[in-house]
């Protein structure tokens, strides 16, 4: 394990070929201040361009993944001041990261915390995790994609219930409704996420990147456009070294050595 750039609100390490970002504002349950979000985006962007990193794990503490955007920071904003600050420009950068991001979630994933987890590509939850959009209780609505991503993940009726009452879902309910990939004991959620990231890191990186891109297209385009996009990415992979190596290794009955080119 190696520690990289030091930040004020997050910890950043690597382990084998995976990058790990840990949200670290324990006194406020990892509330997502603007400074934290800027640091997070900086760390993710550095991993994205680091050839030694092939998948990323994003986690918080066992007590809290993140309890939402920082309410203290937002409470005095006006419509105009919050619009002019354009904080969402930073949030949007998370969704533009090309490498797969696995959220390892324990404890609270509320408001912006739930939205951040949903922006990731895979969610591994500890049994203690709770996912919710409680913004209604403080006079607002989800602002970082919750009304769209939660609805796509759990369906209209459940999303309505959660967003209109502010009541969270347990990890098991989130699993049953397809919001999370796996629920495991609190002792193992982080290791489970790391193992999954390492498994993905062993795959050919160019194919992983183009697959992620094609899957995300589902949300932005009609299926005909998505299918065409997928096909172009498929064709493009035949100019990668890893496609030649992967298929050759299969025919020679040996393990492939993927180089990310
Ligand atoms: N922002 C700021 N501080 C927070 C936040 C938060 N979101 N959540 C918790 N804290 C602080 C508390 O104020 C408290 O601080 P202090 O010790 O100084 O009083 C400390 O963390 C511990 O919290 P509690 O004492 O409340 O701990 P409990 O275990 O009793 O309760 C809860 C935990 C249930 C998580 C409770 O803290 C809570 O309800 N938190 C707020 C949850 C919430 O409403 N989240 C949504 C926020 S709005 C949002 O996320 C919109 C996103 C849109 C993006 C905006 C980009 C600009």
Image (tube, rainbow, N blue to C red):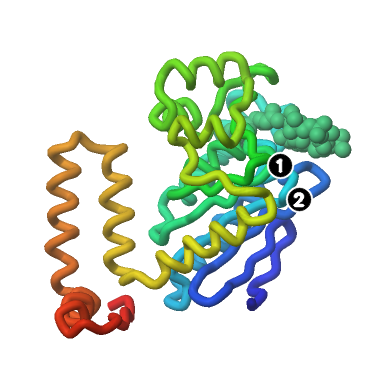
Above or below, comparing residue 206 to residue 40 in the picture: below
Is residue 49 found left or right of 239 in the rendered image?
right
Whichever of labels 1 and 2 marks the residue nearer the N terminus, that label is 2
Q: Secondary structure at mark 2?
A: loop
Which quarter holds ligand 1? top right
Secondary-structure class at tag 1? loop
Percent across and percent down for residue 236 are: 16, 65
Q: Is residue 156 above or below residue 148?
A: above
Question: Observer-nearest residue: 121 or 37?
Answer: 121
x and y percent of residue 176 in the render? 48, 32
In this view of the protein, can residue 179 be seen by the observer?
yes
The residue labelled by disc 2 is 25
Q: Position of residue 187 (x, y in %)?
A: 69, 54
Density class for disc 1 (Cα within 10 Å; few <14, some 14-19, many ≥20) is many
Q: Quadrant of residue 7?
A: bottom right
Of residues 239 and 183, the one nearer the viewer is: 183
Q: Residues within 10 Å of mark 2 (few under 14, many from 20)?
A: some
**Which residue is the site of mark 1?**
31
């Amino acid at each position: 394990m190696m520690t990289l750039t030091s930040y004020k609100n997050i910890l950043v390490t690597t382990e084998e070929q995976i990058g790990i970002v840990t949200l670290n504002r324990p006194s406020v349950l990892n509330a997502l201040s603007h400074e934290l979000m800027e640091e997070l985006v900086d760390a993710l962007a550095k991993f994205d361009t680091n050839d030694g990193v092939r998948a990323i794990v994003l986690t918080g503490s066992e007590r809290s993944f993140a309890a939402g955007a920082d309410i203290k920071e937002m409470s005095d904003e006006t419509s105009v001041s919050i619009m002019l600050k354009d904080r969402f420009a930073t949030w949007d950068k998370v969704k533009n990261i090309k490498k797969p991001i696995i959220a390892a979630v324990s404890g609270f994933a509320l408001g912006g915390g739930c939205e951040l987890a949903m922006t990731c590509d895979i969610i591994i939850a500890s049994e203690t995790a709770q996912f919710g959009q409680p913004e209604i209780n403080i006079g607002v609505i989800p602002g970082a994609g919750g009304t769209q991503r939660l609805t796509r993940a759990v369906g209209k009726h459940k999303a309505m219930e959660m967003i209109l009452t502010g009541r969270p879902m347990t990890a098991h309910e989130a699993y049953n409704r397809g919001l999370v990939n796996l629920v495991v004991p609190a002792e193992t959620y982080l290791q489970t996420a790391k193992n999954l990231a390492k498994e993905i890191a062993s795959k050919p990186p160019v194919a992983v990147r183009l697959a992620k891109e094609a899957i995300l297209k589902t949300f932005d385009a009609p299926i005909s456009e998505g299918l065409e996009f997928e096909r172009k990415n498929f064709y493009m992979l035949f100019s990668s070294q890893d496609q030649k190596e992967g298929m050759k290794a299969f025919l020679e009955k040996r393990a492939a050595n993927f180089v990310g080119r």
